[in-house]
Amino acid sequence: MLKNSHPNFDKMDELSQKKVPFFFMVDFLVENVLVFTENELIKNSLYIDFQNNTDIPDQQENQTNIQLKSFPESEEIYKKGFDKVQQNLKLGNSYLTNYTCKTEIEINLTLTEIFHRSKAKYKVLYQDQFVCFSPETFVEIIDNEIFTHPMKGTIDASTENAAEVLKNDIKEKAEHYTVVDLLRNDLSMVADEVKVNEFQRIDFIQTNNKDLYAMSSEISGKLKAEFQNKTGSIMKKLLPAGSILGAPKPKTLNVILEAENHRRGFYTGVCGWFDGKNLDSCVMIRFIEKENGKLYFKSGGGITHLSNFADEYQEMKNKIYVPIH
């Protein structure tokens, strides 16, 4: 498993102990850990819009109708990685693997326009490199109580009785149980009295393409004394995020590195805002990245031994959207 020994975790501890507000971003493999105090955000062309914090200047509303075209990898290419994951599931190396792909897209908006016009709980625009509009909280810390909200399982909202179908789907339910169990164990490393407060909540997500329902749960605990006011130490323990990795974490990471044909970078990493007292953070999913002048959307989903190839391929494509309506 990853060592998570980056010096910027110590910097995060230091700033949180001094109650200095800061923003951080950690990539999927915990190789890049970036930390910015409030006055460094704009200087670094970093714009954030979180549910409780925003540093974005007002923009004139652009009324252009959005045109998004995607060019997903072929079923054959997707199946190569999917089969590698299934092989490892059968060998017992993993019982849930989050498998992701990189899809070239064309859109008639810039990354900046996507950032300003999209509607999401968490939005990040970093230089002219990537934009992220994530619906998924990683952890929140409020008065030394830590909360996490794993989101696992989605369905096309137009499906008849969609919410009920999602809640009762054997594969989606197994995946959700696994992630809740994994994150309950993860939180126990930094907190006491860990409990599940809400199980299998169904959220509605509106997109330009099709509307989705997503399944979430809420888990909480009371931070152990040695982790209070130590954001960096908490992240060191919890990363990579279980909901976009799988279980068990160390072996599943090897499966992902073997099966995926792209580097995730900051996609499925974690970013967060510490306001001087409390922390809010998200998993960096719903992610568009610029590479050599082209745009790529990274998306995927959890694979278990119950997964159906056609359904998973479709889910990966369903998640290629921008929340602009």
Image (cartoon, grey):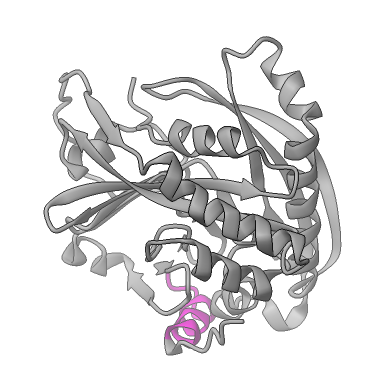
Q: Residue at x 49, y 80 (%)?
A: 18
Which is nearer the eye, 137 or 302?
Answer: 302
Which is nearer the eye, 183 or 43?
Answer: 183
Q: Looking at the image, how many numbered discs can be counted on the residues?
A: 0
Q: Residue furthest front?
A: 76
Question: Residue 143: in sight, yes or no?
Answer: no
Residue 294's place in the image compared with 235, above or below, is: above
Residue 206's place in the image compared with 92, above or below, is: above
| Residue 217 horizontal side relative to residue 284, left or right | right
Location of residue 167 (image quadrant): top right
Magenta span includes 118: no
Location of residue 163 (image quadrant): top right
Question: Residue 102: in sight, yes or no?
Answer: yes
Q: Is the magenta stretch mostly helix, strand or loop?
A: helix
Residue 90's place in the image compared with 325, above or below, is: below
In this picture, which residue range is highlighted in magenta?
A: 8-21
Q: Residue at x 50, y 54 (%)?
A: 80
Q: Residue at x 32, y 65 (%)?
A: 38
Residue 104 place in picture, x, y as percent: 26, 44
Which is nearer the eye, 212 or 271?
Answer: 212
Location of residue 220 (image quadrant): bottom right
Which is nearer the eye, 8 or 40?
Answer: 8
Q: Residue at x 75, y 43 (%)?
A: 306
| Residue 251 horizontal side relative to residue 301, left or right | right
User: Which image quadrant: the N terminus?
Assistant: bottom right
Residue 129 place in picture, x, y as percent: 22, 58
